[in-house]
Amino acid sequence: MRRRYVINGKVHDLVVTRGANGVFHVSHGERKFEMQGKTLPDGRWRVTVDQRPQAVRIAAQGDSRFVHSAATGALEVEVIDLSAASGGDRAGAASDLLQAPMPGTVIAVHVAAGDAVHTGQPLIVIESMKLETTLTAPRDARVKTVHFAVGNTFALKSTLVTLQDP
């Protein structure tokens, strides 16, 4: 089944098929890999990608899943309904809003309104669940608004930085 995901603001088109014993076969362009998930007694999940296991915490809100691991930090994974007419529009809009993957506190701000930024440039650093996460620019753009200052707390899905066309 063809699926579209927005992972931290970046669109990924995947083909996912279910195999035996809970294994999923995933194709992303030319890359192919296997994934499997299993719940652990403490509420975490053991996610295995290409035989590399990793313990993660997963929280859900609407169409989004928030995945947190010690190795990768926090990721927001949103499933886009490809049958919805607005699916492409939602994906484009997501790249202009950097939203909080979980509640937390701003610990560093690297940009100000009006700054030109490039794909991958660090914009803001947050602390959630005792872990620091750096949110980066998903595309070349100009910073329209920085919504929170150092020391401010924010809720899940709060817009932290808004971008606009350069």
Image: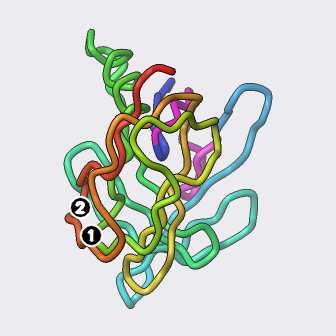
- Disc 2 packing (10 Å; few <14; some 14–19; many ≥20): few
Give the residue drawn at x 27%, y 52%: 147
Residue toward you, 154 or 148: 148
- Residue 116 lies in magenta, yes or no? no
Label 1 to label 2: alpha-carbon separation: 4 Å
Residue 49 in the image: state x and y as whole percent: 67, 59
In this picture, which residue range is highlighted in magenta? 9-25
**Secondary element at tag 2:** loop
Q: Is residue 31 left or right of residue 77?
A: right
Residue 69 in the image: state x and y as whole percent: 53, 73
Q: Which three-letter amino acid code belongs to the residue tagged 2? A: Leu
**Secondary element at tag 1:** loop
**With respect to residue 6, does 37 lie above or below?**
below
Give the residue drawn at x 60%, y 67%: 72
Are the residues flagged by discs 1 and 2 in contact, CB closer than 8 Å? yes
Q: Which three-letter amino acid code belongs to the residue tagged 1? A: Pro
Residue toward you, 7 or 142: 142
Q: Is residue 103 left or right of residue 164?
A: left
Which residue is identified by label 1?
103
- Residue 22 lies in magenta, yes or no? yes
Residue toward you, 127 or 145: 145
**With respect to residue 104, does 92 lie above or below?**
above
Give the residue drawn at x 43%, y 32%: 95
Which residue is identified by label 2?
156
Q: Quadrant of residue 71?
A: bottom right
Q: Is residue 32 left or right of residue 156?
A: right
